[in-house]
Image (cartoon, rainbow, N blue to C red):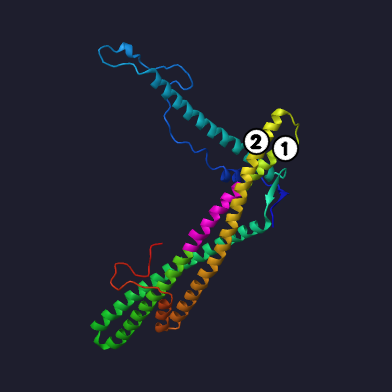
Amino acid sequence: MPPRQRGATPVAPWLAMKDLQQVMVSGPNLNETSIVSGGYGGTAEGIIPTSTVKGSGLHPPHPSSLATGDEAARGIAVEKFDIVKKWGINTYKCTKQLISERFGRGSRTVDLELETQIELLRDTKRKYECVLQLARALTHHFYSLVQTQHALGDAFSDLSQKSPELQEEFGCNAETQKLLCKNGETLLGAVNFFVSSINTLVNKTMEDTLMTVKQYETARLEYDAYRTDLEELSMGPRDTSTLCRLDAAQSHFQSHKEKYEKLRADVAIKLKFLEENKIKVMHKQLLLFHNAVSAYFAGNQQQLVQTLRQFNIKLKTPGAEKPSWLEEQ
């Protein structure tokens, strides 16, 4: 569906300023450049004439070299002034457009289908972040449980050697805790793989798409700002001065329109690929999580190990300084 213009709903002024800060986050990109003293033909204060240095053997620089350096400095200054000027004009127009939209006096271009998909993505990301947080909590809590089982197994084993009358009972419990600890390590390997995959999906894949969305939203604001500017000029008088401004406004509008349409297409493509990738990743990860948890709590060690092999999850060999299934989060 092609985008259309519609009136904006008035909101509180502080919300308008918040959105404005998000759009206009930085000034023009100016590289640092040293400019000679004197600027645009000013007095050269602080420069010692070479004629006052006696016996130094210094010679005054050639006039042509001075002129070349001065022209280069002026050229750099003019170029940077133009950059600041263009940035200032663009910021003014976007600020005017944003405030106009927020207070219901202006119109904005709306692509209902695309904006619905964008809002759905943001909602999905929030929910997946919640799942990721809970899965990490599960990993840490279960890690503590396995550590406790390991320590308990060692204590039972030690007591079985020092208590002949209860050697068999302590020994059985020691073996049970060691088995639970081993299965727990295997389960944590699966859960940690689940956490790592969800983290990549949420904080890399989804975030990359949302960065493009932010660029698209900024381009949309600029497009509407220059569209409004062109419409206002078109309704004014048609004298020589106005016609020149109208031609410039038409050129700027066309440039921002092309940028907006390109980013809109980029967002649509990224949303499509993201949805396909999300379904593929989550299908695999949810199956892994279900099979691993079910096998662990059913006491099916063989099925638990088979689940990790099925998803190509490898644990490090025993004796490592840190548990093989625990990665730094």
Specify the amino acid type for callout 1. Glu
Residue lying at the far front of the rendered structure: 64
The magenta stretch is 200-219
Question: Residue at (30%, 84%) from the top-left corner?
Answer: 170
Q: Image height check: is 250 above or below 69?
A: below
**Label for residue 232?**
1
**Does the magenta portion include 40?**
no
Q: Residues within 10 Å of mark 1 (few under 14, many from 20)?
A: few
The image quadrant that residue 232 belongs to is top right
Measured as percent of width and height from the top left, residue 317 is found at 30, 73
Q: Is residue 14 visible?
A: no
Q: Disc 2 designates what residue?
A: 248
In front of the other: 103 or 38: 38
Question: Residue at (45%, 77%) from the top-left corner?
Answer: 292
Measured as percent of width and height from the top left, residue 36 is found at 42, 24
In front of the other: 71 or 90: 71
Question: Residue at (75%, 31%) from the top-left corner?
Answer: 238
In front of the other: 72 or 189: 72
Q: Which image quarter is the C terminus in?
A: bottom left
The image quadrant that residue 236 belongs to is top right
Q: Which image quarter is the N terminus in?
A: bottom right
Main secondary-structure element of the magenta-colored stretch: helix
Q: Is residue 175 visible?
A: yes
Specify the amino acid type for callout 2. Ala
Q: Residues within 10 Å of mark 2 (few under 14, many from 20)?
A: few
- Tell me the SS state at disc 1: helix
